[in-house]
Amino acid sequence: MDIRLIPMLAILYLLSFLDRGNIGNAKIEGLQEDLNMTPDQYNWCLTVFFFTYAAFEVPSNLLLKKLRPSRWLPTIMVAWGLVMTLMGIVQGYSGLLAARIFLGVTEAGLFPGVAYYLTMWYTRGELQLRQAMFFSAASIAGAFSGLLAFAIAKMDGTAGLEGWRWIFILEGIATVLMALAAYFLLYDFPETAGFLTEEEREFVVFRLKYQGLADVTDGGRTEGQGQMVAEADEFRWLYVRQAFWDWQIWVNIFVYWGIVCPLYGISLFLPTIIRELGYQASTAQLMTVPIYVTAAILAVIVAYISDRVGKRSPFIIGLLFVMIVGFSMCISTTNPKVVYAGVFIAACAIYPAFPGVISWLSNNLAGSYKRSAGMAIQIGIGNLGGAMASNFYRARDSPRYILGHGLELGFISAGIVASFILLGSYAMINKKRRRLTNDETSTKYTNEELSRKGDKAVTFRYMY
């Protein structure tokens, strides 16, 4: 299954992350000066993207299953590819601001959609490795962004356009072309997958339907067979409301912020930070490459181990502490080598932690539509951290960026506290539920009632 699904998803997200973050590369190639923008105006262009990006994620995820992934995902991809291409011909601050607003609208459905899509194919004990395999495309996108910007910037003056305009135009066209191919290369659901035999389709559907409620995992330990309760798969607004009122989603968002604020801070400002340390623009672009490649490799390794041991929190908490080490190095000195090493260390913790926090929540949401809404809330509200991070690194704070690095350290610390809250709460709830015997459960609840309760059912065990 992996070879049929993961490569295409990785390419889609690579292009998404590339198109979202290439404004950082365009900036050091002269975008801000050519459009006569102030540093605050540039930061607003970064910020507004996340407002519309967050607002449209829940509706998009609810539409994904109804409209089919093989149609919905390529369609929104064509839309953002066109926006990205047109961004290359903006003539001022207002034009760039409007383009970034529409880029947020059109890109909103891709990442939460793909993250949810994977839960339709893989059980929760298999999920983080697959999330990491496609998310590592973001790391590769960071590397490609630097390499492509370095090469495309040499087109400066071609057709009378500045080099930074060609970065937007060519990468936008590449997105549209790949989207057209995706209409024919993406699969929808296991039930309709032509590459599976009838027996294989039945097996995949069965194990997904009964995961977490029949043969459940308790923090990595598999318990015995209990009531056979199918996961709710029909659409009800009840499940969407349950997602908005679920405490674990809102606590998880603080963990998410502890990872995504540093992630966006690095992706949007890394080339600038390196250049401010005294390197030329071309050198700054190239020096981002080894950071992202190493981070991508580590993301897959950590995810593999996490799935093998059936635990999420030890890896997430440990990586958050590594981030603190990295940003502490950055804030403590102006020595270029130390700052670069600090950014390197931080990135190598951020990218493995991100698929972990996505998988951790999705593992603990039962019911297809509740999971869909819950993951979109997590990613949508969580990505407002990108709006905050867009304003952390102000031009007047260079080259130390004490405010930016300090705010990142604050969010990471909040993420550590939230992680421990989740860990303790999950352990306590699982312990309470284990006290109930199968006989007590079956006399109190019908299978239909347990199915509607989803992860709130006494038969469900949280994964931590």
Image (cartoon, rainbow, N blue to C red):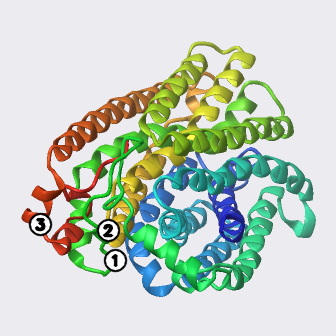
- Distance in Å between CA atoms under marks 1 and 2: 6 Å
On screen, residue 392 versus residue 293, left or right, reads: left
Give the residue type that dot 1 points to: Asp
Please identify, in this view, whether the residue under mark 2 or under mark 3 is nearer the observer: 3
- Distance in Å between CA atoms under marks 3 and 1: 19 Å
Front residue of 88/458: it is: 458
Give the residue type that dot 3 points to: Tyr
Q: Is residue 189 visible?
A: no
Give the residue type that dot 2 points to: Gly
Q: Is residue 300 visible?
A: yes
Instruction: Determine contact: label 1, label 2, CB under 8 Å.
Output: yes
Query: Compared with residue 319, is residue 13 higher up or lower down, i.e. above or below?
Result: below
Residue that badge 1 annotates = 233
Instruction: Looking at the image, tell me whether mark 1 or mark 2 is earlier in sequence order.
Output: 1
| Coordinates of residue 136 in the picture (x, y in percent) | 66, 50
Q: Residue at x 19, y 67 (%)?
A: 450
Determine crowd level at label 1: few under 14, some 14-19, many 20+ residues with C-alpha closer than 10 A. some
Front residue of 155/459: it is: 459
Front residue of 377/431: it is: 431
Q: Which mark is residue 445?
A: 3
Residue that badge 2 annotates = 367
Please identify, in this view, whether the residue under mark 3 or under mark 1 is nearer the observer: 3
- Distance in Å between CA atoms under marks 2 and 3: 17 Å
Q: Which mark is residue 449?
A: none
| Coordinates of residue 113 in the picture (x, y in percent) | 50, 68
Query: Compared with residue 21, is residue 166 higher up or lower down, i.e. above or below?
Result: below
The quadrant where residue 291 appears: top right
On screen, residue 421 versus residue 196, left or right, reads: left
Query: Compared with residue 1, is residue 297 higher up or lower down, i.e. above or below?
Result: above
